[in-house]
Amino acid sequence: MSGEARPNVLDPRQLMRIEAMHRGFLYQHLYLANCLLRAASAGVDKIVVEGDEDVELHRAADCFYVQVKTRQGLLEAGDIKGALERFALIRAEHAAGARMGTARFVIASNAAPAPKLAEMLASADWPKDVEVHWPGGPVAADPALPQPPIDVNAAASACSTFAAKLPFAMLRPDTLTWKLAGAAMLAASGTPPRRDHAFHRDELPTLFEQLIVQMQDFPAPPAIYRAQINEPPLSTGGRVRVLSGLSGAGKTAWVAEAATHLGTPAVYLDVGEMPGPALASAVAREVAAKLFGRSHGVLGEILLPGASGMETLGALNIKLGQDGLSVDVVIDNAHRLTPADLKPIVNQAQNIRFLLLCQPGTVTQEIAALLGVEHETLGGWDEDTIAAVVAEAGCVADYADCERLSRLTGGLPYYVLNAATVAKREYDGRIAAICADVEAQTNLVATAQEVILKRAFDTMPDPMKEVVAALSLADVPLSRDEASAYLQKACKLSRQSAINLLRQLPDSGAVELFSNAGIKVHDAMRLLGRAYIAGRGADHERDSRKLLSATIIESIQKDWSIAKVALLVRLFGQLGQAKILVEFATDELFHEMGVWREIEPFLIAIAEDKDEDAETRLWALDGLVFNDLREGDVERGLKRIDAMRALLDSNKLGSDEWLAWAMKRMLAVSSNDDVQGVMDMLSEVEERLPKSDQHHRIFRYNRALVMFKLGAYDLTLQETERLGQEYYDLLGLSPEQVIGRNPPAIRPLLPKGRDNRDDLKHLADTLDLHAQALQRSGRSSPFARIHAMKFYELAHAPQSVIRVGQDLVDDFCVHNDFEGARDVIEKTLLPTVQALNLVSWVVPVRSQYAVVLAYSGQFDAADNEMRRLAPYEAGLSPAGRGELQDQRRLIASLRRSGPPPQRKVVIPPAVKELLAARNEQAAPPQQRRTKIGRNERCPCQSGRKYKHCHGR
């Protein structure tokens, strides 16, 4: 969802005004680009931008003055009043002979005329020399004038379509379009060489030729270029920039594509094999040829015979200053040079902007330090882009698979493409399969990532290899103190040696640093480190994992995060800690953390291990069944329930084990509408239920749940109403106290000195079931769902927050409250999914968001979101695919027929008074949560991805 989040600004209206202004300018420049492409065949002698009018087309016999208008709605009469007055003044100058030729006037707009303006156009007194053009309106009769498109995207497309008919075979039509739009922007600003704001007919072939030459100097961009996260422009106005990235990060592809959209001159130099002393001459020669190659005599002023490279560069710098010109010079493989080679050149050429492309390492750090700049990085591909790439390669993946591939490759483009190629060839296109093999180090075909990075890894000193390998077992950042303590034990280092090696690590390019003093081996490099650990033998690998698990346990106690829990689960599984894993799996709240994929393979292995004790195997099955029923896979759940029964029959297990089996069976048979089976299980469970209030409350909830599944909604409501009140009493709360309070304001009201999470979770479950039963009975209770979400959040049950939140969104949509639905998704669901990396919920929540956008009338945004989700479709379950297709059809239907009107939400006066009172009592408002893409830059300004910084 990277790039789609709206900026969190102080004044949204101001942002909308700014966006509209820039859309208008871009639309105008694309209109002019279209005019430039038509000029030669239409006999236009000169085109002026931002003169008396937005665009002027001059010919010997006549002159068109074009006012370009962009509007969100219809074009009103008042919108063109000023243009008509200005046309009258220009018309008078032509009539008086102050201007040559016949004046003709055009208003070109993306919007159709409003009724009043349409009436004016049809009237007899409308000026005969004034035309109004709009999409779908009268076709422009003169070939010099393009038909106005509906919006910016359509303007670019129309321009590219026309450009494709012109004889510039070496230049892509869209490239020519954007270069011309950039040239139009420069002319509009009066920047040399267009101080007169004009393009002349005799210079157009040269202009097109220059644009072609500029692109030819750079490597050819990919046929289909896919942007990386927060991709910077090639030129930012900064004098010197350093952009670093591992081999395979896509630096060259990025700069090649970026150059095609640059409207100013740029030069590309690959200095991989160039001696440092030759750099000044090369820069001077290439820049001079680019800017002055067609200007007679100018090259002779710069490339003086016998002058040194630095002298020539100095002469070029003076000429650039005199002419008010500037140029961007991209130096690829700059890390092959020394800082001493680069600094004098940068100092000598003050009128040149330098972009240095480097690989991470000591030299790059020295270059950045000597030039006084911070090095930038490319963010890699996000999961949506990875999904599009693997789908194009003929592979199958859901969102979780794409997120997994992102973690393994660091999102670096070349490695993702290679992994998709290998998956198609060796794994029948299954991305999940290649990820599993690469993680387990069992892939028979080496990936390009392993081959390329192995060279970098092998050149490291042995102590550095040991450190990188040990840290590679962790896919979360460790604090420097944690990393130091772990390395001292794992690598048998003294404290000082560990600290020294940690200080040297950043220069190796193998690690990522975080603003919270964290350190982690780069995702793309961890494969090499783990292979090195495995090569040291099973005992060494096991000891390292034990030491790391102890470190992570201590870290979780200080700073809990789902990512750390997921790592700990994997470590316990790899170490064979069956009982700990089973303890995790039988805790309801564990299933809320979104790490089920991490633990499921280990639980299956435990359940099938006949050497494991029966009690542990049964509880492993209990955890598996819980997830089966949660996901609706009753058939698989019943098979595992039968396996639990077999363990009970053949072993002397306790009452808790029997009760676990019985409860799971009762829930499973209710899903199959087996009324008699449910009644038999209810009676049997109730007879053997321990005499404790807690057990009886849990039993009563499960009884209400099975009644709900059997369609006995009145019985369900009777039970949930009583049970809900009991849980409120246990927590010392009333429903009235919850209204108008967010979870942070409710927490101080809870009982002190005890763990309330289970009671909070059970109250939320009860309220959710109550809301479902009301809905099935044809009634509505949004407060039940809203309160359930609050209690789920207090219980740290994020998946249930998402599930109930989606139900609440559907409830709002049924009642035509689309603003309320959108508010729930934007303020709660999307931020929760993204911040906690709940990968299984990404597609369902985003597709639901697309539907809500369509209900809100934002059809293009809805279609764009569904288009980004399309590559995941093949990897979804049949039910998931069906839901996505139904949503796509619903959006198309809403576009055709229009959505229902937004319901006017009326809040009763008593509720308003209560909310006002609660707001006065509330603590200072917390900063509103904003949607942060996992692969977006972290808001802490570290420059790192959110998922690698505060998203951990």
Image: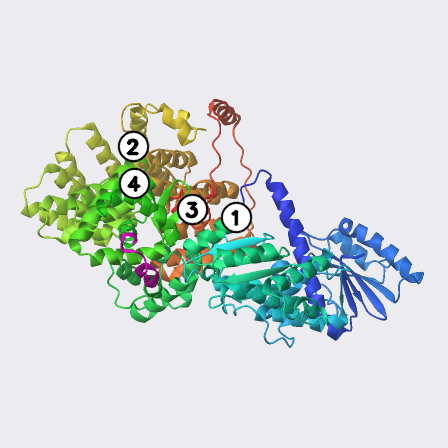
For the stretch drawn in magenta, the main secondary structure is helix
For the C terminus, the image quarter is top left
Residue occupying image coordinates x 23% and y 34%: 698
**Pointer 1: residues within 10 angstroms few (<14), some, or many (20+)?**
few
Q: Is residue 714 above or below residue 43?
A: above
Query: Which comes before the other along the chain, label 4 or label 2?
Result: 4
Q: Nearer the viewer, residue 542 or 888?
A: 542
Mark whose residue sits in front, 3 or 4 = 4
How much space separates mark 2 and mark 3, taking CA atoms? 28 Å
The part of the chain drawn in magenta is 454-464
Q: Could you say which disc has been placed on residue 946 in the image?
A: 3
Mark whose residue sits in front, 1 or 2 = 1
Q: Secondary structure at mark 3?
A: helix
Q: Could you say which disc has been placed on residue 925 in the image?
A: none
How much space separates mark 3 and mark 4, taking CA atoms? 21 Å
**Pointer 4: residues within 10 angstroms few (<14), some, or many (20+)?**
some
Q: Is residue 3 above or below residue 60?
A: above
Q: Secondary structure at mark 1?
A: loop
Q: Which residue is mark 4?
A: 482
Residue 693 lies within the magenta run: no
Q: Which residue is mark 1?
A: 372
Q: Are marks 4 and 2 in contact (CB under 8 Å)?
A: no
How much space separates mark 4 and mark 2, taking CA atoms? 30 Å
